[in-house]
Amino acid sequence: MKNITLLLELREATKKAKEAVLKRIQLEEEKKKENERKEIRKQVEKKLRNLERDMMSDASCGNSYTIVHTVQERDKKSNKFEDWSIELQEIYKFLEEKGLEPEVRKRIDGDRPTAYSVEECPYAIIVSWEE
């Protein structure tokens, strides 16, 4: 009878240890993702620090919107925000925090930037100031 009790206690202790290890691994992964998101956010802020200047330049050229970022098909797996790449999520959040109303539009031929074709980057995150 003692052996059965010891075996049950050992089984319970093993189960708890396993749960603790899994919890620690999960916390490490969450921390790693959070650090990655912070690093990407810094890059986004650096990339978009001249956004207002770009918007003024586009407005002076007669455009009613600014393309903030071109989007490759693989980065925008679906229309769900959670399925987008971390970079796209951070760009979108950054623009919303600035008080802008970003939107994702399908690009058309001749759309700037011309460095990327419409086939390579079929979508763009834009900020428009006229309807």
Image (cartoon, helix red, strand yellow):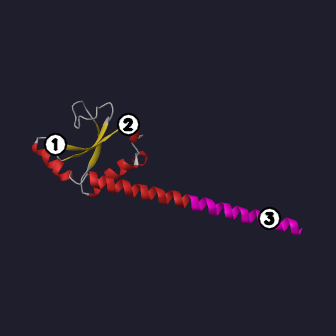
Q: Nearer the viewer, mark 2 or mark 1?
A: 2
Query: In 3D space, how far apart are the residues under numbered discs 2 and 1 (Cα atoms)?
Result: 25 Å
Q: Secondary structure at mark 1?
A: loop
Residue denoted by label 3: 8
Magenta region: 1-25
Indicate whether residue 15 is drawn in magenta: yes
Whether residue 66 is visible, yes or no, is yes
Circle 2 is placed at which residue position? 73
Residue found at the very far right of the displayed protein? 1
Circle 3 residues within 10 Å: few <14, some 14–19, many ≥20:
few
The overriding secondary structure of the stretch rendered in magenta is: helix
Check disc 1 and report the residue beneath it: 64
Would you say 48 lies left or right of 53 here? right
Residue 103 or 25: which is nearer the viewer?
Answer: 25
Residue 27 coordinates in the image, percent (x, y): 53, 61
Quadrant of the image occupied by residue 70 = top left
Are circles 3 and 1 on residues that touch, CB within 8 Å? Answer: no
Query: Residue 33 vs residue 56: left or right?
Result: right
* Direction from residue 58 to residue 99 in the image, left or right: right
